[in-house]
Image (tube, rainbow, N blue to C red):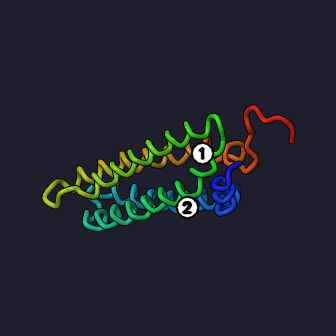
Amino acid sequence: MTDRADRREHDRPPAETARRLVLEQHVQLRRMLSMGLLQARQSVAGDGPQEPLRGLVGLIRDVFVQHLADEEALIVPILEDDLPVGPLRVEALREEHDRQRGELETLCGWPEEASDLELAARFETLATALLGDITHEERELLIPEVIRDDHVVINQVGG
């Protein structure tokens, strides 16, 4: 391993710690998205004012975008060192994160004069998709078999 790789590995938390931190954030995100879904459904049904939904959408965007940055800081270095498939996982993760950021920004840029019912409906669609993304990530990526410290080294000879 190079000095740079040694330093990078030394500076990062253990894989299990990184995995646990990301999963803890997922719990918080699920709660927030569920609250937003409830509020959006109430708005669509005409059971509540839409203004609080706009504020909640902004808060969810801020927390979610910070989570994506945290996840990339914690998980990407682990995956990059896991050849040959890790870098492909990093690419897929970054593409998903870019899509999620874009969708959240679009929703937060919803014009004040535009329909609040449409905002609620779009938020419901996005929140449902984000919850699905979180579940998929936990099932396929954030598992001990993928996020681990002991990587297999291809063409390694001896110890």
Residue 26 badge: none
Q: Amino acid at mark 1?
A: Glu
Which residue bears the numbered disc 2? 25
**Sequence-first disc among 1 and 2:** 2
| Category of crowding for the residue at label 1, using alpha-carbon neighbours closer than 10 angstroms: few (below 14), some (14–19), many (at least 20) | some
Q: Above or below — where is 109 with respect to 88?
A: below
Residue farthest to the right, as pictured = 159
Q: Residue at x 61, y 40 (%)?
A: 86
Count of numbered tags: 2
Quadrant of the image occupied by residue 141: top right
Q: Quadrant of the C terminus?
A: top right
Left or right, 43 with reference to 96: left
Horizontal and vertical percent position of residue 98: 40, 47
Q: Nearer the viewer, residue 45 or 7?
A: 7
Mark 1, secondary structure of its residue = helix
The amino acid type, in three-letter code, at marker 2 is Gln
**Whole-number angstrom distance, CA of label 1 to CA of label 2:** 22 Å
Within 10 Å of disc 2 (Cα), the crowding (few <14, some 14-19, many 20+) is some
Residue with the mark numbered 1 = 80
- The percent coordinates of residue 9 (x first, y second) are 67, 56
Q: x and y percent of residue 71 in the render?
A: 54, 56
Residue drawn at (39%, 59%), measured in percent from left and top? 36
In this rendering, position of residue 111 left or right of residue 27: left
